[in-house]
Image: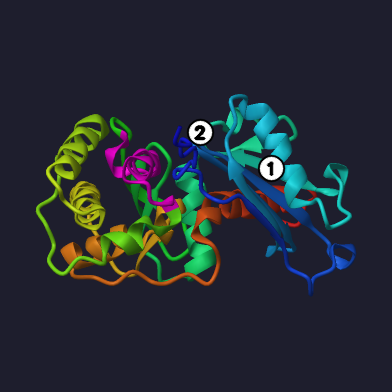
Amino acid sequence: MAEMNTQEYWRWPEYRHTVLDKDWHNSKIITAGVDVGSVGSKAVVMLDGELYAYSAMRTGGVSEATAVKVMNWAIEETGLKLDDLHYVVGTGYGRVNVPFAKRTITEIACHARGAHYIYGPTVRTVLDIGGQDCKAIRCDERGKVLSFLMNDKCAAGTGRGLEVFADLVSVPIQDLGKVSLSVDEEPQPVSNTCVIFAKAESLALLRQGWPKERVAAAYHAAMADRIVDLLMRVGVEKDFVVTGGVAKNAGVIERVERLLSIKSLKPNIDPILAGSLGAALFAKALYEKQIGLR
């Protein structure tokens, strides 16, 4: 009897990192931001406003337990303990479930602030593609939100939609974007009204004999159409950047850039950390205010 393939193509790699040339013992202010998203959770530790350690993992069934787990993993090899953190801010879908946070701040504000840290003060438009929603944010030179629009009615233009599709075509989710760009000619987008319809249409195309690369291109094109529609409604001003896990999917980003006739800035820090970075920066400002430095 043939052995069933049990590979979970949707499961993206979890990871953590510590900046080795920094020593927290010499820092005046140690803050953290915990971004509990609907699909992924991220924790960041900053020393005097500079990135020191971080972790990213799948959000479990209990947000509170995930918040504790992702924070402990971020500080695992640093020698830090939770009590050493001067201030912690929670953000994201499950921000009220970060038991050790002193404050919660919306993911809109945190992503704008985090994008400003990652990409610099020229950022004016932030596209955050999360696990179950997509946000278009306009901000000023300080990373303060001026306006935003959010689409959270369907997962078709989000990370969760990509997870469903990865399993459908049996391609690891981290390779999907590259696979979708390997076609010689761009196909028409699949239905972009609902992830269920998009999945059904993609499955029908596979059964018709379409190669998975072509079906992936059609699915990514539909995602890009949906995202650009949201961006056009909020207005796109340079510089334009992308945050969230889908920022690392070249198939989505290149198609969005093509439709907008604009290039996004490229990050030198993992863009999935934008929300937690913003939260940690807010934590620093709040702690400084608390001790009378502001």
Q: CA distance from mark 1 to mark 2?
A: 15 Å
N-terminal of the pair, mark 1 or mark 2, is 1
Considering depth in this image, is 147 or 42 the residue closer to the camera? 42
Rendered view: 56 above or below 192: below
Specify the label residue 86 is tagged with.
none
Q: Is residue 35 left or right of residue 134?
A: right
The percent position of residue 147, horizontal first and vertical second, equals: 33, 48
Question: Callout 2 environment at 10 Å: few (<14), some (14 to 19), or many (20+)?
Answer: some
The percent position of residue 248, horizontal first and vertical second, equals: 43, 60
Is any part of residue 232 visible from this angle? Answer: no
Q: Secondary structure at mark 2?
A: loop
Quadrant of the rendered image containing residue 163: top left
For the record, the magenta segment spans 155-173
Residue type at tag 1: Val
Main secondary structure along the magenta-highlighted residues? helix
Q: Which residue is mark 1?
A: 70
Considering depth in this image, is 205 or 24 the residue closer to the camera? 205
214 is within the stretch colored magenta: no
> Quick one: quadrant of the N terminus?
top left
170 is within the stretch colored magenta: yes
Question: Callout 1 environment at 10 Å: few (<14), some (14 to 19), or many (20+)?
Answer: many
Q: Which residue is mark 2?
A: 93
